[in-house]
Amino acid sequence: MNVFCALKSPPTSILSPQNPRISLPFSLLPSPSWPNPRDTVAIGVSWERNYGIAAYRDSKLPFFSFFRSSPTRNHRGRLQIVMSPVLICDAVEWQDLKKHAEEIKRTHLRDLMGDVDRCKLMTAEYDGIILDYSRQCADQETLEKLLKLAEQAAHLKEKINRMYNGEHINSTEDRSVLHIALRAARDSVIHSDGRNVVPDVWNVIEKINNFSERVRSGSWVGATGKTLKDVVAVGIGGSFLGPLFVHTALQTDPEAAEFAKGRQLRFLANVDPVDVARNITGLNPETTLVVVVSKTFTTAETMLNARTLREWISDALGQQAIAKHMVAVSTNLKLVEEFGIDPNNAFAFWDWVGGRYSVCSAVGVLPLSLQYGFPVIEKFLDGARSIDKHFYSASFDKNIPVLLGLLSVWNVSFLGFPARAILPYSQALEKFAPHIQQLSMESNGKGVSIDGIPLPFETGEIDFGEPGTNGQHSFYQLIHQGRVIPCDFIGVVKSQRPVYLKGEIVSNHDELMSNFFAQPDALAYGKSPEQLQSENVGSHLIPHKTFSGNRPSLSLLLPSLSAYNVGQLLAIYEHRIAVEGFIWDINSFDQWGVELGKSLASQVRKQLNLSRTSGKPVEGFNFSTTSLLSIYLQADTGLPPDNSTTLPKL
């Protein structure tokens, strides 16, 4: 219901987190059914022409508490409104899950896995991908309570809609979050700030398609007329990890590999000169094209690496060669041109694309298209689009990204498991875990709510991983008998490169997948002392060979690892991570935590310059930093004393 109050005078202050309490004189208008003060929640305050206050009883936006004295008709007095942000952990649904978690902790996965009906229910399938989460420490009641948390307390559908509608859900940077638009169909309509961005996206896609085909066909050649068959993409963070994951996944895909014959794609990210040396070793500047990826064209590490490769090219071919051998992915055309790159060879992306979500923009699509051809990469975009549609339209109980996100929240916030192991049983996915590590930890490693309120609970997961079976001989010991770490097992039905040796019991891929199917059960069931005794294991060894089990995991099975499937896998994890942030009510799309270190590094950089060029002593740092810097500065740099340009010795 609505309650209207006529104020005696206009408001002079604005309700905000910085000014959370205002007190105003008012006259209460007649109301036939005034609610009990304890039940009244004001979630919005609007100033009408007569300076009325509208208080709405609506649980969808529990942002304000409304207090007043018991009113009567035509009551006059002072109206006090107190802003009281509500955290998700205060919701009844959250508290209910906390109680339920204590019950689940008393139930072993051995018992849960014995319930066939439960196991049947805890699966989801879409477009060839199967999710089995029956080995989670959860039952059907858990899922119902998690869905209730998502729908009634976190208003997940509303938040997903706001993202797809282009609202500025990245509130700290006042931006839309529209990586879905990067792979949208040409006839889609997706707005940001009142503008349909899809035509802009497709203009860039067509430009990439045209340019990559010219380079690959040899109609665009280098300064000496040679075909540009080698590409070095220069970028860091989201400009590197995502495209590297996709490239590594496609290298052994038969179709992609056929299109990549005779070509190389390398990624230069680290400002460490060793990374430069490794990337240009074996390359000829005459046949090399450099793609510099920096939205602002000011990223310190990227631009120093770009200047280094510019020097490498110009030293061999002359300054005029830069325009033929270097292109940019950036929006700062002025700095692109000043650098020596033709602005016509700059490929745009937008503020509504976060770096770690930018694989499907020119950041990833340009270098990948140069390597594999745009038709292959278009299939990758199609796969991601398929999951975008599923995420938006599927009911939550069968929605793969939503289920994954809810299970992550369950493990982190209710069962107290802070880490997650990403275990792809495919060597082609060896760079998947590092990409998800950034995507997840930079997105959800937050300590305050989206309203800036300190959180009394942990968010985010510590992500790590390694392809199976390599990981089994590395860190699985801890996973089986040490800390409890929920695991994502990712398997592929059809190998990219099948191998079978006559006389062997199984093929190489079957051997790999035997472990994929066995490990989740080993974690779930474990091995009891009684079982060991029945096997006549010595009593002194039984404690060492006992596996407690009850260690949660989930299995994701892909039909193959084509470009389409790689796109699906990427989008599943992108949306999963967004779901976690939506539930925790944090901003998963900013990354202020990376700024402080950059700022301090700038101070150190100035000190190093002063000390090396003018002999200035180290000043302005604490004792420890001063001591280490002084030792560092005393060492021989291996560079000529005249500070002349020095490139890596290959």
Image (spheres, grey):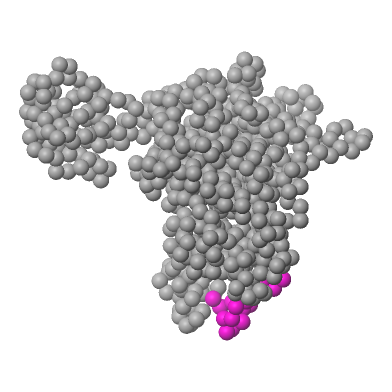
The segment highlighted magenta reads 633-650
- Res 75 quadrant in image: top left
- For the point 79% across and 41% down, the residue is 497
Q: Compared with residue 16, is residue 319 higher up or lower down, i.e. above or below?
A: below
Where does residue 382 sit, x and y in percent of width and height? 61, 38
Where does residue 159 sit, x and y in percent of width and height? 42, 33
- Res 474 quadrant in image: top right
Q: Is residue 188 left or right of residue 423?
A: left
Instruction: Work out which quarter of the rendered image holds the N terminus and state it.
Output: top left
Depth order, front residue of 619/259: 259
Q: Is residue 215 left or right of residue 586?
A: right
- Direction bottom: furthest residue: 642
Where does residue 60 sit, x and y in percent of width and height? 34, 27
- Res 347 quadrant in image: bottom right
Viewer can see residue 620:
yes
- For the point 67% across and 57% down, the residue is 215
- For the point 27% across and 43% down, the residue is 17
